[in-house]
Amino acid sequence: MTNFITISSLLVALSWVSVLNILAYPVSKKICIKISDYIVKVCAPRVFKILDCYKNFKFKGDNDSKKILPEQFIIIANHQSLIDIPLFMNFMPEKDLRFVAKDSLGRHVPLVSEMLRAHEHCIIPRKGSPSVAMKELDKFGKRVVERKQIPVLFPEGTRSKDGSLGQFYAAGFRRLTGVAHLPVAVCALEGGWKINNLKNIFTNLSNGSYHVKVLKVYPAPETKEDQVKILEEAKVMIQEQLDIWRKEDSENL
């Protein structure tokens, strides 16, 4: 019964604003931006409150870890679910986040697609010439610096289906850091892979959790060697944090 209540509450909270944004986008970008702002500032936190209320699903953002963050920076993190986007919005409501996302998310994904396009997130084509993707990253890097926004990049490039940490790809990270020249904040998140489809939502939502934490901030990389070192160390740190959280969660069962 609580599964039905949870899903119903989420639909009530999100469906109307999703439809409104779809209708607004082709008519007025300004209106779409206002609706997208509402999604970011109101809907994202509301999702986690509903999950907590009905299923005791806890958002566990480590706010103390944010104290080491500078004014502007690039976030790199592991990637487990589409919900990673509202997760970061809920974790850093004081920051103006902009995500690097694949082009399939830019169309026909309720709540997400119009928000990504209206807010000018970086939508990368997965097919075609790599030079097109690099040009998009160049424009994105310059744009976020000028607007004092926080770019978020998932170096794995795709969501993990089972929570395992995949390969970190360097091309996009090197291009973005080369253009933006910002400090790099390494973040770890855990929990999204357990609720990444409808079946898992029904089986894993109750008493679950979604962790996120800032692990380390690096100075803006100056060389290719700096960039490679950050990615290599980031993957090790994230895996270590995942192991800690998973051990804690298993002990609390």
Image (tube, grey):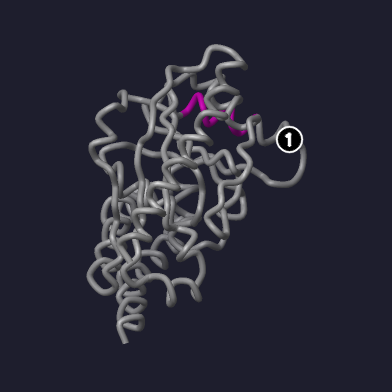
Mark 1 element type? helix
Judge by depth and name the residue closer to the eye, 5 or 62: 62
Q: Is residue 108 above or below residue 156?
A: below
Quarter of the picture containing the N terminus is bottom left
Residue 26 in view, yes or no: no
Q: Which residue is at a point 26% across and 56% down the rendered structure image? A: 42
Residue 178, how many percent across, how many down?
Answer: 56, 19
Q: Which residue is at a point 56% across and 52% down the rendered structure image? A: 164
Tally the numbered discs: 1
Q: Judge from the rendering whether residue 135 lies leftward or rightward of residue 66; answer left or right.
A: right
Q: Is residue 40 above or below residue 13?
A: above
Residue range of the region highlighted in magenta in the rendering: 135-143
Outermost residue, bottom side = 1
Judge by depth and name the residue closer to the eye, 128 or 201: 201
Amino acid of disc 1? Pro
Residue 67, how many percent across, how many down?
Answer: 25, 30
Q: Is residue 23 magenta?
A: no
Q: Residues within 10 Å of mark 1 (few under 14, many from 20)?
A: few
Q: Is residue 198 above or below residue 17?
A: below
Principal secondary structure, stretch drawn in magenta: helix
Residue 185 in view, yes or no: yes
Q: Is residue 136 magenta?
A: yes
Q: Which residue is at a point 41% across and 60% down the rendered structure image? A: 21
Residue picked out by circle 1: 130
Outermost residue, right side = 129
Outermost residue, top side = 222
Residue 94, how many percent across, how many down?
Answer: 26, 38
Judge by depth and name the residue closer to the eye, 39 or 244: 244
Q: Judge from the rendering whether residue 147 lies leftward or rightward of residue 226; answer left or right.
A: left
